[in-house]
């Protein structure tokens, strides 16, 4: 079916991408793509990113829209260190990078992977001995490095952001060791792109000391703002230096979660953190956050660039993306209909398919619970769908810990298209799927990310799943129908006569717990 992309504003001003065929093929419970040859061809896709600071190999288990990281290894080779001064790759960096690439080639062979997609960015692109290094790599490892220019680097990074955020609207900013790229994203597409010499290795060589570097950063960023405009409400940060700064922002704020993907900062918080970094001992900060020494060395310079970005572009929100060039390479290989799928729902479907006792039951449970959500927003229904798909994926855990394992999986898993508040909401609803009370949980600090109303909604969803999941093993809809009259506060169950034995003591208790969570009277009729 041909489908048109439709971007619509949600209640909070957030843009979401939907298709006119949402209820059919593109819907969260439409026809699965897992068995489609074009999707299954993405299984075990290996990519290598040879950057100015790090060399990394990632192997994606990519048959689902939100791929799992089957293998992930990084070496901080520092290829681009000193490049601005010498014009050549760092000699020690070359040795370390080549050794890493030899290892990656051997690992890929051991996994029987298809040919690795290998990209090299600013350092190899700009160094006079870059071609020599490429030839050496191919000769020694058999790997062919695809050297991309700044425009292509910006495009791939932006596509990586779109992998996790199909609805992303704003400016993607990818910082590496020797360059910084900017790209516009809107409506699921990548727009204008620019590159700049604002990588920390390059900035270390700017003459004039600290004042000279500050002046150069300001002039360069203001020129970028003049070219791209300042009407971008969001900046999406890509790159290890940005993630290190975001982790420090979490530390300064005593933020209860350490998942960096989709961590969101306000402009004032960023400026406060930049000042905080300058006022504190880097060794102590590194110990508190687990940041590597090589990464922390570049953080103060990157922090000054981020400060100027905030001052020049005036964004309302700064969001962190753990997805970048490597994910952009995977996105490049995805068929269009797979790109348009909701990454959260697809990841949950994949989890149910591989981990649940009865794959496919999540859809039936969702349909059974829909009467409780007659006038719910698309965003709320999306969370209900995700929870129903995940409700049984931790059944192997010990019963004493199953509730907390559910919560941990939702809040720490590598899921795209999910804000931190949504992670906690999903986790809390799954916790209540297995446990009536959340009081006294070690997870309580994370509950602070939700309002009282959101916590109550998560409890209702969890207790609804707790009842529906055990009411009828095959299909709760075939056994009965839920009814909900919110004005009169009456929760009803129309119980089919043939299924009356299913409404036993435990089922009645869980139905009652759901009614209590809703503050409702219960009404059961046999039909």
Image: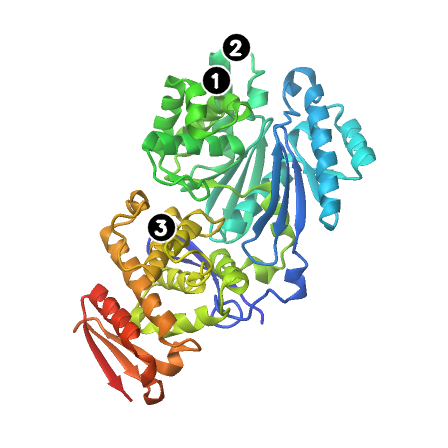
Residue 217 at x, y percent in the picture:
49, 22
Specify which label sits upstream in the sequence, 3 or 1. 1
Q: Which mark is residue 215?
A: 1
Among the 4 quarters of the image, the one containing residue 314:
top left
Among the 4 quarters of the image, the one containing residue 308:
top left
Secondary structure state at the residue bearing disc 1: helix
Which residue is located at x 52 percent, y 34 percent? Answer: 227
Q: Residues within 10 Å of mark 1 (few under 14, many from 20)?
A: few
Picture layout, residue 63 above or below residue 480: above
Image check: 390 left or right of 201?
left
Q: Are marks 1 and 2 in contact (CB under 8 Å)?
A: yes
Image check: 508 left or right of 414?
left
Q: Which mark is residue 208?
A: 2
Residue closer to the observer: 451 or 217: 451
Q: Which residue is mark 3?
A: 424
- The colour scheme used to paint the residues is rainbow
Specify which label sits upstream in the sequence, 3 or 2. 2
Which residue is located at x 53 percent, y 70 percent? Answer: 25
Residue 206 at x, y percent in the picture:
56, 15
């Amino acid at each position: 079916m041909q489908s048109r992309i439709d971007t619509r504003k949600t209640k909070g001003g957030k843009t979401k991408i939907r298709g006119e065929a949402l209820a059919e093929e593109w819907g969260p419970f439409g026809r699965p793509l897992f068995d489609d040859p074009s999707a299954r061809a993405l299984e075990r896709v290996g990519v290598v990113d040879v950057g100015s600071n790090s060399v990394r190999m990632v192997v994606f288990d990519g048959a689902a829209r939100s791929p799992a990281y089957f293998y992930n290894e990084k070496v901080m080779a520092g290829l681009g260190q000193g490049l601005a001064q010498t014009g050549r790759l760092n000699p020690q960096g070359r040795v370390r990078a080549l050794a890493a690439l030899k290892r990656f080639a051997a690992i890929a062979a051991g996994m029987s992977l298809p040919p690795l997609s290998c990209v090299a960015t600013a350092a190899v692109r700009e160094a006079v001995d870059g071609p020599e290094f490429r030839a050496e790599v191919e000769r020694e490892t058999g790997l062919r490095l695809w050297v991309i220019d700044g425009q292509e680097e910006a495009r791939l990074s932006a596509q990586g952001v779109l992998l996790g955020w199909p609805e992303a609207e704003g400016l993607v900013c990818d910082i590496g060791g020797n360059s910084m790229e900017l790209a516009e994203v809107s409506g699921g597409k990548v727009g204008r792109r620019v590159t700049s010499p604002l990588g920390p290795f390059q900035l270390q060589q700017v003459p004039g000391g600290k004042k000279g570097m500050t002046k150069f950063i300001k002039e360069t960023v203001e020129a970028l703002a003049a070219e791209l405009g300042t009407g971008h409400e969001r900046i999406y940060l890509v790159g290890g230096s940005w993630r290190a700064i975001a982790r420090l922002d979490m530390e300064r704020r005593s933020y209860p979660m350490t998942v960096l993907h989709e961590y969101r900062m306000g402009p004032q918080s960023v400026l406060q953190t930049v000042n905080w970094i300058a006022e504190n001992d880097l060794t102590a900060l590194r110990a508190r956050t687990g940041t590597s020494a090589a990464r922390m060395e570049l953080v103060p310079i990157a922090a000054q660039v981020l400060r100027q970005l905030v001052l020049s572009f005036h964004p309302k929100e700064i969001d962190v993306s753990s997805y970048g060039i490597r994910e952009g390479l995977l996105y490049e290989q995805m068929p269009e209909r797979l790109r348009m799928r909701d990454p959260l729902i697809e990841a949950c479907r994949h989890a149910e398919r591989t981990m649940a006792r009865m794959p496919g039951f999540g859809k039936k449970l969702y349909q059974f619970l829909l009467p409780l959500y007659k006038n719910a927003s698309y965003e709320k229904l999306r969370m209900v769908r995700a929870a129903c798909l995940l409700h049984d994926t931790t059944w192997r855990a010990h019963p004493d810990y199953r509730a907390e394992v559910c919560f941990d999986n939702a809040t720490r898993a590598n899921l795209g298209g999910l804000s931190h508040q949504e992670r906690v909401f999903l986790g809390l609803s799954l916790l209540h799927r297995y446990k009536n009370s959340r009081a006294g949980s070690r997870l309580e600090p994370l509950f602070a990310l939700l309002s009282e109303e959101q916590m109550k909604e998560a409890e209702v969803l969890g207790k609804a799943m707790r009842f529906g999941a055990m009411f009828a093993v095959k299909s709760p809809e075939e056994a009965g129908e839920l009814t909900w009259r919110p004005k009169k506060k009456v929760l009803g169950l129309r119980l089919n006569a043939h299924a009356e034995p299913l409404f036993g003591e435990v089922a009645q208790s869980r139905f009652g717990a759901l009614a209590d969570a809703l503050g409702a009277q219960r009404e059961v009729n046999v039909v």
